[in-house]
Image (tube, helix red, strand yellow):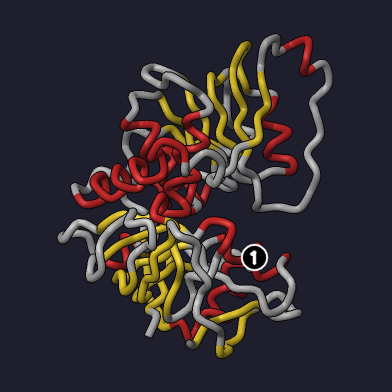
Amino acid sequence: MRALITTKDGSVEFAEAPEPRRTNSELLVRVSASTVARGDLNTARLSPPGSPIGLDVVGTVVEPAVDGSGPKVGTRVMGYTSTRAGGWAERAALDSSLVVPVPEALADNVAAALPNSGLAALAGLEAGGFLLGARVLVTGATGGVGRLAVQLAHLAGANVTGLVSSRQRHELLRDFDWLTTATADEAEGPFDLVVDLVGGDVLSRAMSLVAEDGVLASLAQTVPETASVPSFWFAMHPGARLVSVTNTRGQREAGRGVRRLELLAQLAETGRIDPHVTGAASWEEAADLLAALGARELEGRTTLRIS
């Protein structure tokens, strides 16, 4: 089958790849759409040449899981490839715990932008526990994960602030009249939960804004710089916790991944969350799109048409 794989220069190229080797709980999906996400950029930059790539999948089930789990053959589905990747291919293997049917009214390009970013956003917010009335700060709020995180926190009843990198980027969130936006210098804490999606100096600044007994959940993967702990942080923020969060841990337990994906699909179908899909392109353009994402030249989410 035709697939995109990573190259030694941190990009992707087409290759003939073998059919995915599946476990008993994995289905085979004929892929129709995926998306370009920062996680894909990290895969291209950090994985050995020849590695599969692609975290998000929308398509049709062509072979069921051997153990009988998951949607049936012919079902239009969306799913998350997790650490396996491989969504940028004609066919992909998805564990039944990370794939759900796509609601009829939900377009492929919107569904494709939900699994990876949506699961990451939910994982970060979950670290804060009960959010009704909580003060929540999301860094990198204009990115794919950040945009979903602020919307989901708002739906959970939190008072939400989105951190942006410049005054100009406030405009990218202007549709959310309930959202407070601020740059790192402008933000005023304390916050019961900080979801950090940037790292580096932004993470260091976010640590100074967390409340006593608050939580700073870091999914940072945007900048390579190392964060530093502010002076007297431990004494001035008693009980505060810095926790590492991923969107893979625990998703297969007790149907959690399926429930979360179903929730994301339902919220998107009814218009209560918007992943901000701004364009669609053929997967022939994937290398150029990754380069544009790395240069921070892409606004919103771009979906890939897999053919």
| Residue 282, image x, y percentages | 41, 83
| Residue 289, image x, y percentages | 53, 75
Residue shown at the point (63%, 67%) measured from the top left:
294
Residue shown at the point (57%, 67%) measured from the top left:
293
| Residue 296, image x, y percentages | 59, 64
Q: Pick out the residue farthest to the front.
A: 67
Taking depth in this image into account, of 244 and 92 the one nearest to the observer is 92
The residue singled out by tag 1 in the image is: 43
Q: What is the total number of numbered labels drawn onto the structure image?
A: 1
Image quadrant of residue 8?
Answer: bottom right
Q: Is residue 131 left or right of residue 124?
A: left
Residue shown at the point (20%, 56%) measured from the top left:
103
Q: Pick out the residue farthest to the left.
A: 105
Taking depth in this image into account, of 184 and 144 the one nearest to the observer is 144
Q: Report crowding for label 1: few under 14, some 14 to 19, many 20 or more residues within 10 A (C-alpha).
A: many
Residue shown at the point (48%, 42%) measured from the top left:
251
Does 179 sit above or below residue 9? Answer: above
